[in-house]
Amino acid sequence: MARAFTPKVVTANDLLEGDVIYQTEDDRWSRDLSDAELITDEAHAQVRLLDAARQASKIVGAYLADAVAGENGPEPTHFREDFRRTGPSNYAHGKQETSPQPRA
Amino acid sequence: MYRYSEFDHEFLAERNAQFRAQVERRIDGSLTEDEFKPLRLMNGLYLQLHAYMLRVAIPYGTLSSAQMRQLALLAEKWDKGYGHFTTRQNIQYNWPKLNDVPDMLDALAEVGMHAIQTSGNTIRNVTADHFAGAAADEVADPRPYAELLRQWSTDHPEFQFMPRKFKIAITGSENDRAVIKAHDIGLQLVERGGVLGARVIVGGGLGRTPMIGKELSDFVAFDDLLAYLESVVSVWNQIGRRDNKYKARIKITVHEHGIDAIRAKVNERFLQVRPQFKGADMNLLEEIKDHFAAPAFREGSVASFESAYANDPVFRSWVDTNIAPHKNADHAIVTISIKKHGATPGDATAEQMRIMADLAEEFAYDELRISHEQNVILPHVHKSDLPAIHAKLKEYELATANIGLISDIIACPGMDYCALATARSIPVAQEIATRFDELKLEHDIGHLKIKISGCINACGHHHVGHIGILGLDRAGVENYQITLGGDGTETAAVGDRTGPGFAYSEIVPAVERIVDTYLNQRESAEETFLETYRRVGMAPFKAALYPEARANAA
């Protein structure tokens, strides 16, 4: 029997900045995992991934990442995704910066 | 120092213009990512975990002060104010924006630098002994030959789509500071009967299948060397495996065919290739040699050095660890530690880069080097200038006296930046350095190299660390395997695994137990960690690391 589907979010990197981004339910891209659409249906996940793949001039490398529902939206299940949503641990750079670089 | 010719400048300008147009076409949607990716990789641009990363080549690790200042400018103008020096004598910028990269490349071209072939299945940046041209123990300066190799391999039409990447390292000394036995080709300059040539090592490499290189030829004269190397790469390009990227490197080809069969094929190919080299390469080498002529070493009293050494214990400690003998007795080689305790190994701020550039200009004949151990070197310094250099370095947190000691750790970027990583390595390095600084033990421990990689690709050279640490993902949790007894010098060896790995929170205590064991086992303070390990073997370290296994066996 096929493995049970686990909830997913669609994530990618922004084409210009490279920053980690997440697909929202209303078809935006957010830099915040808690805004992401948590997908619980496998067929819907494939459709949403195709939606993302069509936006090649905005994003790079879309894929489905495991996530679980948390109090404030989706939470990562693996430490790699936890680092992706946070930024590096040696400096408070990337998403941890208080005043992110304005988008060029 | 090599100065670009008109041809070099034009080539680079054209290449950068091409890439600028490619970036524009990617942004306006004319190129897909699949089409763009190989193009950006050819120009050193990766997409990492949180951002793009631009890897800039520092050929054979040599920089002028003007080049170092330009690296600082890039860090400040287009990145977050710092750069990361790597184990391949490159510098990486962790936060560039895609549409800024063409400007960054143009800025690099202004000082004769580029990011070409810092990625992709090509011949990568040729690395060299970071003490080249200064070391007391070398036969000849390997950098003119390294520059010849750079020109030969850059855009070489036969070698743009190889089975996998290809790395060459070169040294002029018997004492190997360039890890030549862990490269696809390692070259050691040797002189035979007044003729300069190289011993050629092939098939070394780390990664998931670590191999120590084997001797392909004990001597190839310079006249024949380029044709010989072209034959080696050409043979591998034809028979190297393209069916499986994990078996594509030349180390696997050498392993599967055997060194004698490879030698026979290379010799056969050499007969075809040799006539194509009609001496232009040797004429070029002669020209290049002029660029690398040793500076006119100044004369003068070293009394001020001797008095500072006698009277200032902090200076003395720094001299004892960070200074190496120079071929000119009144001079010294200064290694500037980019490993302040608790800081990220290899990261320098724009301000630090400028200070180092200033010191090079004022005191070091305008030369700097980047070592594969992620430090910066002033290769030629008159000893009387050492106190002034040390004082300046102290002001900018660059005077850590730890070269070759336990906190002089090589660490790859790991999962803090790298898309390939399976675990973090930077914080492990930071915590080990901080811990042993607190214990005030590192000078007592002496020569000990810790090398950390955040995945099996081994950018952190963990296999050849006296203590090697490899970060893995074990069932969704970071886990660290330890190897002992690795060695990256002329007595190269791959380290032995101690046993099961350690959780993130257990890795620093595990290293501490290993070091305690060494301190208990060593016969004298002069016996280094590696010597002790080679004498007593794994057993006492294993017992210290896995006491429960011993208890269970009893």
Image: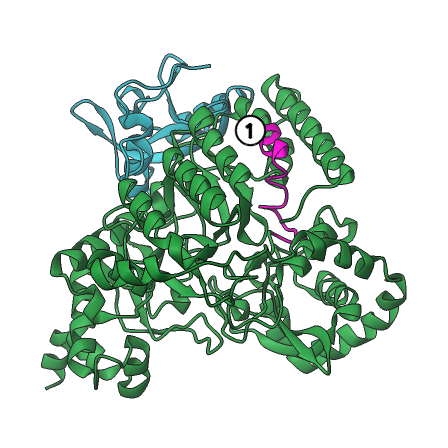
In the picture, one chain is cyan; tell me its letter: A
Front in this rendered view, residue B119 or B152? B152
Residue reaching furthest to the top: A26
- The quadrant the C terminus of chain B occupies is bottom left
Name the residue at 52% across, 62% down. B134
Residue B520 magenta-highlighted: no
Residue B530 placement (x, y as % from top left): 32, 77
Name the residue at 80% across, 58% down. B281
Categorize mark 1 by other alpha carbons within 10 Å: few (<14), some (14-19), many (20+): many
The colour applied to the residues of chain B in this rendering is green
Kind of residue indicated by mark 1: Met
Residue on which disc 1 sits? B104
Q: As drawn, is A40 to the left or to the right of B99?
A: left
Q: Main secondary structure of the magenta part?
A: loop
| Residue B200 visible within the image | no
Q: As drawn, is B274 to the left or to the right of B85?
A: right
Front in this rendered view, residue B17 or B421? B17
B394 in relation to B206, above or below: above
Front in this rendered view, residue B176 or B241? B176
Residue B185 placement (x, y as % from top left): 62, 66
Residue B123 magenta-highlighted: yes
Quadrant of the rendered image containing residue B234: bottom right
Name the residue at 75% across, 41% down. B5
B89 in relation to A75, above or below: below
Q: Secondary structure at mark 1?
A: helix
Name the residue at 32% across, 70% down. B483
Q: Which residues are magenta?
A: B105-124
Residue A57 placement (x, y as % from top left): 56, 20
Residue B453 placement (x, y as % from top left): 37, 56
B483 in relation to B356, above or below: below
| Residue B511 visible within the image | yes
